[in-house]
Image: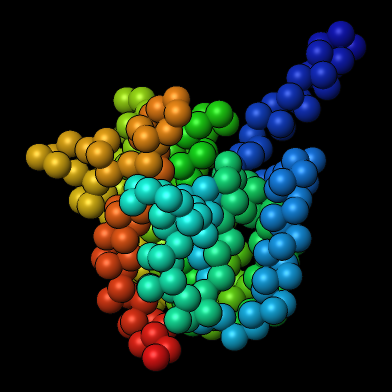
Amino acid sequence: MRAVLLFLLLLLPGLARAEVNLAMAPIGRLSLPWWKERWEATLRAAKETPDARIVWLGDSITQNWQHQGKQEYDNYLPVWNKYYAPYQALDFGFTGDTTASLIWRLDHGQVKGLHPALAIILIGANNFGLPHWDVQKTVPGIESVVNITHHDLPGAHILLLGVLPSIRSPWVSEQTALTNKALASIYAKSPDVTFVNLKALFLTNGQVNPAYFLDPHLHPPAPPLHPSAPTMARMAQALEPYVEKYAGPPAP
């Protein structure tokens, strides 16, 4: 009997750990020097731009807004300057971040002191990468991001973008579709959150077109994941009606 009890005691902690959804847990990345540097820079940017009317929250796709490349496919900054700079918008995108790391940032004051009219969230693509978190884990993770953002920015409407299409694996494509379907249902009648799926911008004849991505241009080429600058421009155009509805017209 004692042996059985000992076995159960050893087993229970493992079972408890198995029930934890890491996609909902705050996981920082301060051990990475570049991440720590960007984290501190975004905190300074928040303090220096208290009148920001728009805040973007996300991963590398969002961080790319600040990249000024030499080619049409990687020259994102002019698009940002046209569509978001007039709103004194803040870009809080971090390469490689999952829902867990974005939750950590929010928990540690990422948007503290800000009062934007609109928060745009684009997160979840990296959940399907190395962590391999599926739809059952990722959807609650995205919901947590939305809930914390709404708590921290109660005056802001939340524009939640669906996980963007990519060409990484059939499993990733399946999880992306299932996640977006679930999110569309969850937020269908929300007065505080508008869900927008931009999938159609990436399709040609019903298939995701690799020509709309940055990654095939890299050396060496990578699987299509990050929208190219022209595709981001089309995304900004598609979002413009929502931006003007919730954040008003851009400053002249």
The percent coordinates of residue 20 (x first, y second) are: 66, 38
- Please state if 87 lies on the left or on the right of 79 as rendered: right
Please report the residue visible at 58 percent of the width from the left and 41 percent of the height from the top. Answer: 96
The percent coordinates of residue 38 (x first, y second) are: 69, 55
- Establish if 66 lies above or below 52: above
Please report the residue visible at 83 percent of the width from the left and 22 percent of the height from the top. Answer: 9
- Establish if 225 lies above or below 181: above
- Is there any visible trace of residue 3 in the rendered image? yes
- Establish if 5 lies above or below 58: above
Q: How many marks?
A: 0
Which residue sits furthest right? Answer: 2
Q: How is the image coloured?
A: rainbow
Please report the residue visible at 63 percent of the width from the left and 39 percent of the height from the top. Answer: 22
* Image quarter hosting the C terminus: bottom left
Which residue sits furthest left? Answer: 205
Please report the residue visible at 78 percent of the width from the left and 27 percent of the height from the top. Answer: 13
Front residue of this view, candidates 37 and 4: 37
- Is there any visible trace of residue 163 in the rendered image? no
* Image quarter hosting the N terminus: top right
The percent coordinates of residue 34 (x first, y second) are: 72, 46
- Establish if 85 lies above or below 202: below
Which residue sits furthest bottom? Answer: 252
- Residue 46's image quarter? bottom right
